[in-house]
Image (tube, helix red, strand yellow):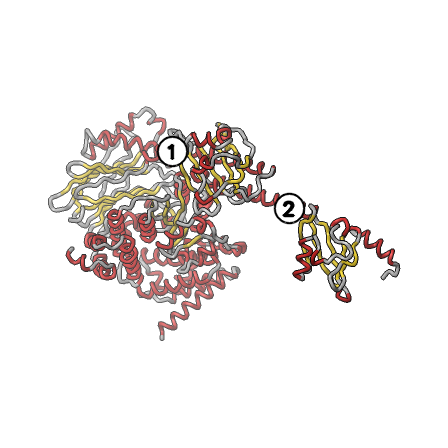
Amino acid sequence: MTATTTEADPAHAYRGYLESLEDADEYAAVEVAVGLLDGGIPAERVLLDLVAPAQAEVGERWARNEWSVAQEHAATHISERVVAAVAAHANPRPVRGRIVVACMDGEWHALPPRLVAEVLRLRGWQVTFLGASVPAAHLVSYLHRYDAHAVALACALPMRLPYAHRMIEACRRSDVPVVVGGRGFGDDGRWARRLGVAWAPDAPAAADLVADERALRRVPPAQLDHLADDEYASLVKRRGELIDSALADLRKRVPSVNRYTPAQLDSTISDLGYIVDFLAAALYVDDATLLTEFIEWLVAILASRGVPAGAIGLTLDHYGLQLRDFPRAARFLGLARAVVTDLANQAGR
Amino acid sequence: MPADTRLARELLDGLAEAIATTDHAGIVTLVNAMAVDLLPELTLGTDLARCAVPALARAVQAGADTFDAEHRGRRLRGTRRGLAGGRCAWYVRDVTEEQARTDALLAERSRTAFLAQAGSRLGLSLHRDQTLRATATLPVPYLADAAVVVHRPPPPEDEPHWIRYAEGDALPATGVGSWDLAAAVPGLADALDGDAVEPSPWLNAEPADLAEVLPDHFGRPGTLLISPMLNAGGPAGALILIRRAERAGFDQREIELAREFAARAGAALAAAELYGEQAHLARVLQNSLLPPELPAVGGATLAGGYRAAGDSLRIGGDFYDVFPTEEGAMFALGDVCGKGVGAAVLTGRVRQSLQTLRLVEQRPLKLMRLLNRALFDAPDAARSAQFTTLLLGTLARQGDGGLVVRVAGGGHPSPLIVRADGTVDQVRVGGMPIGALTAARFVEAEVRLAPGDLLLAYTDGVTEARGGPTELEMFGNARLRQALASGAGLPPATLVDRLLQLVDEWLDGQVHDDIAMLAVAAAPA
């Protein structure tokens, strides 16, 4: 504890904090954060300059296969405890209206919205954090029950965008303005604009936005005329059949698949499903980059785990063949295929 | 070109358009009969740039080719056309009727749009305060420069409350008024009693009367229109629309529109109040049936996870409970057959019985038997033919930081133990469901949890979750064990979250049965 007074700067404390996450040492991590608060650092800075970047690093380490899923979960758990400790320490008095913060249904990345919730709380709002994966019906009944000034929804995975849109519409029907955030809406919020919803790039921006009701309600309408071609709806209906046939195709072309353990098979099937889901979301917002960015990421993830990208290329080809009557889907898959080829060439060089 | 000037004159005078021509110096050289009617100010020799028709004179001075203005109570629209020799002609049409029709159409359109928007906003919310906010904000600026709703909150509040929105405000403001306010604002008391009041110009009422409900910057009000907001049981409040002195007063159509709006707002407020009462009732019942916040238990870390099949009330037939004891804690996790509210009610009965019976018996096996008899003896047990599967256990702290767990099973999936090294064992406790047979048999087992080990009790909603690529395959024991093995050493809350997430992803939005989990580990030293 003696070191904290000289280190009352999140940037200096960062390394030690990350080490305590690495050691899964909850007490040490909380000590670093509380030490900063005691050293006069505002709670908002501790959350945004210490906890948030460390959590981003945790995600990166998982992506690079340096950390296991269990390690990532343990670190996230500690971050949550740290956020709770910082919140308890600051304990601001609510003087403004109620904001409901929730993860979309099926969204489990609860820490970023939790940070937003705490920043809003620090700025005087009365915040209700509903946590991870909140079913739409639950959220709506909550909004009807309490007089919410606004609802902040988080979406970390772009493939959840169609669900996100339904959820946003459900909130609107309760006449509560919505602000969204999270990587799921694109790093520049372009898919939020497509869905016609106010978007905040980070917690302070979200706080500024909810304070301005007119800005919240003044949102250009959704641009989803392309859904009239029915490609999205048809793809969703064929999801199971597509995954089955893609797996059969892989078994034929990549014999080692037949020797996979049940767990390996499950994760292969998940990946096949993710590709369909990301394609569906890309069709929903009519933006091929949603799919191509995912494929880039997936290739990197698999490469870090020693899985060659070739299999992804085969699957994209297979889906492209199955969906040749869907002009937009076929075009998106073609672009994704080109990304795989480029990455393979780069790796070969 | 008629050579006959008389014929030309007759043709000109027969036109429905007024025509005036000028020479190169801008002096009027000819006016037809219609021009005499519409613009009597123009005579031969008038300098058009200085004529007594101001809009026309301005247009000539500015070199404009058109003008559009009210003149002598008529709406006139003129166009200039150049003629040979620097002369020119002005053609002026009387568009009074045409304009009136267009204005009426536009007014009707904006009125319809306003009512449509009001209808959809008012219909959206089921919350009283949101409805009030919509009522105060919607009429501004279309109907008024400021709107104030005076309303009676539900009992036990007695004083009238108000909510106000003025043009330019970011948010509506609220406050508590007094009955003096109702008395001071002319007509307000009547409207609060349900009578419609004619709009009144702001006569000599003291500005102080309304000062408490008007924003500081508003200035002196011009006209006031007070409308009652009625609901089924009588007046719900009153809507006061206020226009500034510069703005024209309310015309008959606007008064009707305001009345219609206030009536709709009153109905929306009534619906919100009714919903509020019922939601409160449902919430009180629901809270008694939701899984509890787990108490702190010395020497152990516990975490529960719960997901009900029906999502909006979040209650169902799965449950868990933890009661601290002297040695550690007692825990229960069970599954009542059926789902939804019916199952939740039986769940409540099982939990209450357990609460009471644990005071007389704390050994899991004996307590299970007692509970079986209690449920079987319940008056309508035979008729409802419902049974419950249950795990009932105790945790006892050990000197070395570990826990001894005794657990009895009543027809429930056996709990799993995740050792620190990733091995997963089953604690075999079969038994029969409780509440179904008087002679039901139950089984008890004892296990030891070293620090780093974890015991997971779960309901079949976890393993029987149907999903995956085919949407029909069960999540199954193998996936559960695999997930536990890869999460060895995680704290209970983290592991439970991870399992909920995996099952949720497996389900991918499909309907599912109730899901409950309870994880126990020795507390870290």
Residue ID at (30%, 50%): B498
> How far is disc 1 from disc 2 in space, using C-alphas?
49 Å
Residue B62 in percent (x, y) is at 65, 61
Residue drawn at (38%, 38%) of the image: B313
Q: Chain of mark 2?
A: B
Discs 1 and 2 carry the same chain letter: yes
Q: Earlier in the sequence, mark 1 or mark 2?
A: 2
Furthest residue toward top: B379
The front one of A141 and B221 is: B221
Q: Position of residue B407 (x, y in %)?
A: 21, 39
Q: Is residue B126 in view?
A: no
Report x, y in % for residue A252. 40, 63
* Residue B427 figure quarter: top left
Q: Chain of mark 1?
A: B
**Residue at image location 79% in from the left, 53% down from the top:** B32
**Which residue sits furthest bottom?**
A349
Amino acid type of the residue that numbered disc 2 sits on in the rendered structure: Asp
Q: Which residue is mark 2?
A: B103
Image location of residue B154, percent across then percent down: 41, 31
The residue where tag 1 is placed is: B280
The reply to whether residue B432 is visible in this rendering is yes
Figure check: B244 above or below A244 = above
| SS assignment at label 1 | helix
